[in-house]
Image: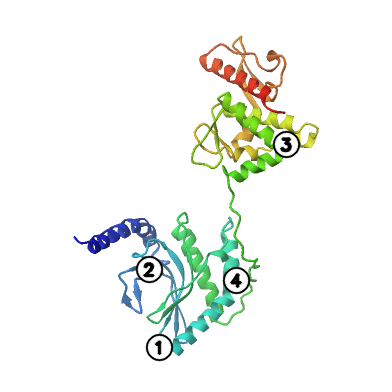
Amino acid sequence: MDKQAYEESQQKRLIKEASKFYIKKITQLDKYENEIERDDTVHKIHDPNHIMYKLDPLESDNLVYEFLIEYDIRNPSVGIYYGCKVLNKTDIQNDAFREELQRQVNEEWTALKLKICNVLDNTFASQKKFLPRVKQTDNAWNNTYWPFWFTLYEDEDVYEVGVRALKIIREIYVCHLSHKEIVIPDIKQKRQSVAPTPLAFTNSQYEEWKKEFGEERVSSFIDVLTEHKIIEKVPFYERAWRIRIDMTNFAILVRNICYEWYSGNKKKQENTPYRFFITLFMNEDYQPFNDNLKKSYKTTKVTKSDGTEIKINLNDFIRADNPSKAISLGKESPADSNRDKERRNVKEAFAKIKK
């Protein structure tokens, strides 16, 4: 097999493998044949390269408006998409006529775009914003034209999101083509900008931490906890450390060191800024803490030396001068003994960190 034949063979194999996910996903719509119909045709001619599911079309003058969900089996990198495809029914083939139809269709979409996105945003009341998701078409051939389309995200259900959104789009077009008033206001357009991306375990979070508490304190915190084997640096991230102790003990350490660092500011002392720590430190399983760090410090059960269990506030054990005031060290089990050693280690580390 020559090089060209080999590369073509490999490309076909890779496309086929990549398409399996999308073909399985879009063909789930076979279950909803009463609402949306499988129809892989363009101008009533079968198209072997596309899988299409269509709602009932609309007609206006010489145009047919198809509302469809589609997948191009030759182009898995595009994924599944949905929107409106307009077909020219006439036999007129000259360029001027085609351009005039495209201008008309584009004007319609421009008039409807902000209203459609408003309804979609309000329907999918999570964090979905549809205006930035509008794709301008690059498709105008064989007397068909897509004025727009939306990509169906990989984590979105093809029916719950795709079909539902398509029905909304179609209903607004029904009103427009029937010359009925569309009472939906336009969505407010904000200046086009790049949305901020929440980050964790990067140099940016580390710099924010140093800005809040000072480089000397932060460096001392890292160095001392590393020396006491309480944390270890995690590779692959810009800035990340994994704790090697119980999460509750780490939460108490964080609360107490912040209490010291905020000395003289009672309001800040009462509100531990866990945000600086959950974006730089992770649990023993190399997973983010999220809200679990904040929730874990409050109370826990410990075993006294006489075998009885008590519920104590662990916020005191680090700073207590008298160990018995904070914790009666248990010796009933190896687990208790290890916990006590860990807490002693945490207390020793706390004493060394720059205040």
Amino acid type of the residue tagged 2 in the rendering = Met
The CA distance from mark 2 to mark 3 is 55 Å
Amino acid type of the residue tagged 4 in the rendering = Lys
Residue of label 2? 52
Q: Is residue 297 visible?
A: no
For label 1, the SS is loop
According to the image, what is the colour scheme of the structure? rainbow
Residue of label 4? 115
Amino acid type of the residue tagged 3 in the rendering = Asn
Q: Is residue 321 above or below residue 238?
A: above
Q: Earlier in the sequence, mark 3 or mark 1?
A: 1
The tag on residue 271 is 3
The CA distance from mark 1 to mark 2 is 23 Å
Name the spot of residue 5 as percent of width and height, x first.
23, 63
Depth check, front residue: 182 or 138: 138
Q: Residue drawn at (32%, 69%), measured in percent from left and top? A: 49
Q: Residue drawn at (52%, 83%), measured in percent from left and top? A: 104
For label 4, the SS is helix
